[in-house]
Amino acid sequence: MILYAALMFLTSALLWAVGALIYRGRTGLIHDYHQMNVKEEDLPAYGRAMAAGLFVLAGSFDLSGIFALFGENRFLSSASLAVLFVGIAVSVVLLIRAQKKYNGGLF
């Protein structure tokens, strides 16, 4: 489980870094077709909303990795995966809501 935890922490660090850049206004890191219909004045709010989804995803990776560090029993492994899947689901919902609000749809 140490390898799993290290992978979660590494992935989380990457997501935190990209999320921070997007939050600070580097919306160019988001693919162009995802922001085709976003108005210029809405770009900062769009970046913050998309970054929030990435922060939730990164946090779920961190929590999943922390649970994995505590041991390899069935309960902790299940809790680790449950935290990961719930975090992914919440993150996807946040990202879809941001896309619909600022872009008018997913694509």
Image (tube, rainbow, N blue to C red):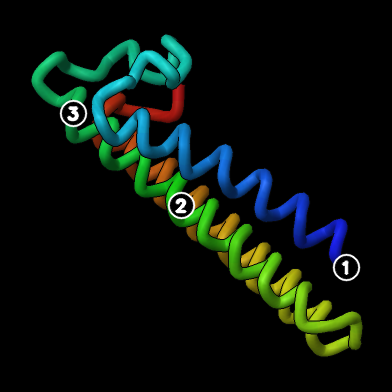
Checking the image for residue 93, the label placed there is 2
**Residue 44 x/y as whole percent:** 18, 28
Sequence-wise first label, 3 or 2 = 3
Q: Are marks 2 and 1 in contact (CB under 8 Å)?
A: no
Q: Residue at x 46, y 32 (%)?
A: 18
* Quadrant housing residue 97: top left
Residue type beneath disc 1: Met
Q: Which residue, given by chain and number where applicable, does mark 3 sit on?
A: 44
**Residue 80 x/y as whole percent:** 73, 73
Q: CA distance from mark 3 to mark 2?
A: 20 Å
Q: Residues within 10 Å of mark 3 (few under 14, many from 20)?
A: some
Give the quarter of the figure containing the C terminus: top left
Q: Where is 33 relative to 91, above or below?
A: above
Element assignment for label 2 = helix
**Residue 92 x/y as whole percent:** 51, 48
Sequence-wise first label, 1 or 3 = 1
Q: Image check: 97 left or right of 56?
A: left
